[in-house]
Amino acid sequence: MADNIKVAVSEQFMDAFVALPRNIQQKVLTFMNKFRNNPAAPGINYETLRSGKDKKLCSVRIDDAYRAIAARQPETGVYMLLWVDHHDKAYEWAENRKCGINPQTGAIQIYEAAVTSPPELNSDKPRLFSAISDADLFALGLPEELLGLARSISGKEDFYAQKNRFPAGAFEALQWLAEDIPLQEVKELISSERADEQAGDDLAKALETPESLKSFAVIDSEAELRAIMDAPLEKWRVFLHPRQREIVRKKYAGPARVLGSAGTGKTVVAMHRAKYLAASLKDGERLLFTTFTANLAADISENLRKICTEAEGLNLIEVVNLDKWVTQFLGQQRYKAKLSYDSQSKQLLERIWDDAIDSHDLNREFSKSFYQEEYSRVIAAQEAFTLEQYLKAPRIGRGTKLSRKQRMRIWEIFAEYLSLMQKRGIVDINYAQHECCRLLAQDPAIPRYKHIIVDEAQDMSSSAFRLLRALAGAEHENDIFIVGDAHQRIYKNKAALSQCGINIRGRGRSSTLRINYRTTEEIRKTAIAVLHGLSFDDLDEGNDIDERCQSLTHGMAPQIRCFDNANQEFAAVLAEIKELIAGGTAAENICVTARTHKLLDDYIQKLTENGLRCYEIKGSSADNRRHQGIRAATMHRVKGLEFQYVFIAAANKGVLPLEQAIDRTDAVSEAESVKAEQCLLYVALTRAQKGAYVSGYGKLSAFLAGSAS
């Protein structure tokens, strides 16, 4: 292919490709590779659209029955595939479509340019955008031909029904207005998308703008083409929103933090950030991509291979959950104590706690859970491993008050616990991370990481963040990139970054993602209602009070139902699943989740007995898409995953919240553990892209009070 030729594929083309029969998809792929090699070749067979409104648009032949719609600008070397369909439908799609460069935004837009007359000025009928001037509508990216359409829209329902007639960027901006976000805020939200220099009529120049790259992928090689089209539904691998792209490529003077609620693409940004930074690594430099759980690390590792090749630095990215990294590092340092990961070791650690308490608290002044919480939240969190340090350590947020005398007395139990761990050759993860920091400080020759990416940061402890600070070395450019969301904190850990030596305040080091790409607005609102009345931190010492998140899609409201017994509930779930599959939904795009392994096993057995194949996503295993069947996973395991439809089963009182998971040591501990259960339900709901079904029997969870239909 000539150096000056650019071949691009639109997001709409990929949507149309997915709907084609599989045998036609193979023909399209063969054509696309031919098109990519030389779009100007005589064999492409461009045909003019005689009734089309845009002379740049033409059809190209796939076979006797199917056509693709392309836009070309030979003088700039740009050839773009916009749509593919059966012959007549392809021509129908193209007839009123235009592909051009918006003079305000500099972005390439595809839209339906059918003329709509604006309403009469004296009409009493309310209009959705009547308070917005023509100039402001144009500033938001609305093409002039669509002014009449925008002025004719009477309400939200009418607006969303017209979605496919608007260019994607303009629709997004108008949607913010439709959802009552002030005009000035909308302008600020989209300001980062604007090109520094206008492209005029030059499609090649316009293809380089952030907003164009939100909807178009430039194809440079056959390998890239295959990677994109092998999984066209995973458009997050190809199309980054301008705000995401800005964060991915930004240079930070030191650590950076990205917040965003479920579905806003935090992990996507983190993975693209890893790819971007890995490309600049020099000999001997490494990048660590870490997270809290092994299963999420497996998912990230699998997805990174979809967007990054060995040539682009994949081999320089080490993806591992932090606990596993600690185990490997201490093994390399010939550390003698064993970490408490397997069930046998965890039982040993529990016996150590029992022995320490029995030897120094004969009257059982406090419960075992109190001592364990005090250790993890005060002693380990602040590295207060001596009596002097413990007496000075703040106990903010602890529900049980302690006098100095009480602290001195119960310190004997903690001292005994630390001593017994050493004697019995085992350490907990908090102390192990502390030991890693000590070993790193003793030996500056131990290699550090040039860059560290942290996903699901809300689940990391203070000990973990101190270790990450040590692993990155002295603060330097782009050293630590942290993404997280306290609304998804489903484990007990909590940390303030600034108290762990990680400074993300000021200097443009903090960002917030506000656009939800995964779930419908209806699912998002139902999920956030589960958390009503709760407050959340910003992973540092402030509050996350941002509420300007908005989903770009709409659909049915989640179905929340309560049945008399488990058999009735299962029958309803089974009927819904069968209806989805009969309607064309692949079983792999449906997930059944439950709070416990026992409940999940029961559902897997019943579904299997009724002729439905199930594939359980377990432990640290990634979701292997080669395995057919309905996905099944616990509510903890679905974190980080997404499916078109999610069924949350047995959402009963006593199951959500799970009684065994509630820490009743004191009022604060109890409230925090209940909050974690609410966050778990929020996480499970927000795995759904199109539809969510929540069901229970007997009495429904209090988290869903008043929601059942």
Image (cartoon, grey):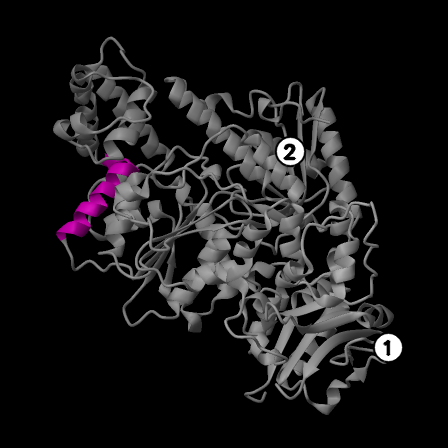
**What residue appears at the point 78 percent right and 67 percent down from the top-left corner?**
113
Residue 34 lies left or right of residue 536; in this view the side is right
Q: Position of residue 432 (x, y in %)?
A: 25, 41
Looking at the image, is mark 2 or mark 1 nearer the viewer?
1
Residue 146 lies in what quarter of the image? Answer: bottom right
Vertical relation: 671 (above or below) 50: above
The answer to whether the residue labelled 2 contacts the one labelled 1, judged by CB atoms less than 8 Å apart, is: no
Q: Which residues are magenta?
A: 426-442
Q: Which residue is mark 2?
A: 603
**Is most of the magenta stretch helix, strand or loop?**
helix
Q: Position of residue 632 (x, y in %)?
A: 60, 41
Q: Is residue 591 magenta?
A: no
Residue 281 lies left or right of residue 52; in this view the side is left
The residue closer to the viewer here, 216 or 650, is 216
Residue 165 lies in what quarter of the image? Answer: bottom right
The numbered disc on residue 51 is 1
User: How many other residues sit within 10 Å of disc 1, few (<14), some (14-19) or many (≥20)?
Assistant: few
